[in-house]
Image (cartoon, rainbow, N blue to C red):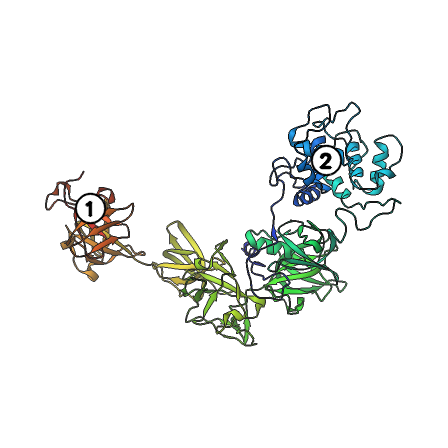
Amino acid sequence: MRKLLFILLATLIIAALPGLGAPVRAIGPIQVGSIAQPPFLDIYGHVAKPELTILGALGIYTGYTGLGGRADPDGLITRAQFAKVLVVATGKGGTAERLMGLKPAYRDAIPPWAWGYVNCAAFSGLVGGYGDGTFRPDEPVTYGEAVTMLIRAVPGHQARVGSGAWPYNYVFYGLDQGFTGTVDLSLPQVPCTRGDMARMLWATLRVDPLDATGLPNSDGARLETDLRVFEHVLQRVDLAAGWLELGPAPGHRLTLAEKVYVLGADAWMPVGGRTEDWARYQSLLGQTVLVVTDGPPAGGGQVVYIERKTGDVTGGIYEGTGLDALGGAFLVLDKGEEMADIPYVGPVAVGLNGDETTPHTEADLLPGDWICLNLDDAGRAVRISAFRWDLICEPADGDFTPGHQDYVAGPAAKSSAGADTVIRFPADSPFAYRPFGTAGHASLAGVAIPIPTTAAVHINDEDAGRDDLQEDDVIRVATFGALGFDPVDPETNPIIAVWAMSERVEGTVTEVGVEYPGPRRFVTLDTPTGTREFERDPTYTDEPAVGDYRQYALDQEGRLFVDAVVPPTEIIVYVTGHTEDRTAEGTRCYLGVDELGRDRGYEYDQAALGEHSGLVGHFEKLTVSAGSGLVTAHAGCDPDTDATVLAVGPDNCTLELADHTVVFASQPVVYRLPGGTPGAAPVYAGLKVLRAGDVVRVASAGWRLIVRDEVAP
């Protein structure tokens, strides 16, 4: 169960953080920086995944059918396709578009889609064709041809290539000058794969051009270091403001694009939706990352790609600290299936419930906190993001322990017109909360709290809305910075997350018991799905007696947490008979009824309700106990009013009475009298027999029963 809780909380741990590292408390939806899905479906685990992702993010390579389709990283790339990629990569895509109508001057046929790209590549000196005047657009480009074109794409380099035999002279120069990255070029005559094309192109885009004297222009690469490509420690991310900050100081503050491709994040958090974006960015803080922008930031360029280059991330439930045999400090984590000791050199910065401005260290952690640890390459914790369910505290021995759960005594108001949802804690709550701005605690009994639209709400393992919270739901609540709650001015320090269990169980008690040490109390219920044993939390529940019918709301550990009222069922029936079963224990009385066309029998307590044989031949509204199934009350509802049917819908109808109109909004109960014979037993028919203009009889008691007293169609 602890492992399950850990997995579920990953969905909330960062979910409501107001901009990782941001000194603000307003929590809004992510406008920019949304983490994009992988650009291609078939690159997972491939050596060229980073480079293909970067080229996809920059719009240089889009695969067969566009982003989101296949890249075919191990497939071959044709000469025409390579020309297109190279032209776009060198910023000449617009020129190629304007040359689309010009047929290339080669002897062989060029596909019309490639005319502009081949023209542009030829006019720019990137390609030259073959000696026989052909271009051979559909032949795969070889490694030697690819390296040759890449070298030609960066000004000043072709003139520096040695005069040896082609393609070896180009291959040697490309390897020596960083055009090919780590691609194996031992067989330059074989066709080049798309994945290797991406790896070599990424390297080429970072090569500086040369001037006439052969000196490099240090700021001239297409993807220049610290102009378009950055590799530094990620210090802060503010998704609300739309930027990230790289360090060390003075560092770089870069604007995030609407969608960002991210690699190497979220190594341990199985989360989804917008909460995944918060968590994945959080897992990169304190690590060296590679960042690529779609243009120079000074000119409006935005971050489109982030990749972790160092460290790792892990997480679990904080249990405490310890020292190893050499005196080294470590954090003790419960990871669900195992315990782990994570070394650290203190102090380690801690962000608590989204608060990155209040100085916290590992010394401020409490057992039971959920923590995400960013690790360096040696496996040491370098940064901690902690989450604490702080609002509901349990008083014990003069102290107050956070992380407890309580139940919703009743939603005071649902959200509307921008207002917050308000929920109320029970009037007899034994728990406490910390008023914001104080060091003390106050009783939680009867306190109402607003749940803002920005709060993350999780119900029964799923993301949910605040208006989905129901009476008797068992909840945990977190505030910003774990700083408490101000009932007078709730916006001072908002609720950032609610974790709820909305599950009920009911049945007949068949056994009760206690186990020691503890004590731990257990109740066995005979439920509609079988016999089940539950642990009972005695905070709000009393010990039931064997034979009782009970309904409980379960807490997040699956314990019986609060007694829930089982509402009785009200049904409209036609009473067809009355029987008595006399035994040595007493007389048991039953009503035979027609319930929506089905023959049923209901027992009633004669001692409590009296003898009811006189109900035979009448319509009755019976109140039936959900627990015992006994009829606990009844009310006559024979039809007593004439009406005319005005309209009939799929589950309602409108009737005109003598002086007003009645809409039967809930599913009406419709019977008919076959043949229109007085005294004949009615037959359930449903709405399908009603037609506009029909004259019927209705029961004014409850406005649900309609009887059509005429020949059935």
Q: Residue furthest left?
A: 678
Q: Is 362 placed above or below 622 here?
A: below
What residue sits right under mark 1 in the picture?
671
In the foreground, 197 or 381: 197
Viewer-proximal residue, 341 or 297? 297
Q: Residue, x 80% and y 24% (percent of image)?
A: 131
Q: Quadrant of residue 71?
A: top right
Name the element at disc 1: strand
**Mark 1 or mark 2: which is in front?**
2
Mark found first going from the N terminus, 1 or 2: 2
One can see residue 248 in this view: yes
Q: CA distance from mark 1 to mark 2?
A: 82 Å
Q: In x, y percent, where is residue 656?
A: 19, 52
At x 46%, y 68%, the residue is 449
Residue 3 shows in the view: no
Q: In this orientation, which residue lies closer to the viewer: 198 or 697?
A: 198
Asked if 39 appears above or below 363 in the picture, the reply is above
Mark 2: give few (<14), some (14-19) or many (20+) Cα within 10 Å.
many
Q: Amino acid at mark 2?
A: Cys
Dot 2 lies on which element?
helix
The residue at which mark 2 appears reads as 120
Residue shown at the point (42%, 53%) measured from the top left = 532
Residue 595 vs residue 504: left or right?
left
Query: Residue 355: image x %, image y %?
Result: 61, 66
How many residues crowd around disc 1 within 10 Å: few (fewer than 14), some, or many (20 or more)? Answer: many
Q: Quadrant of residue 469?
A: bottom left
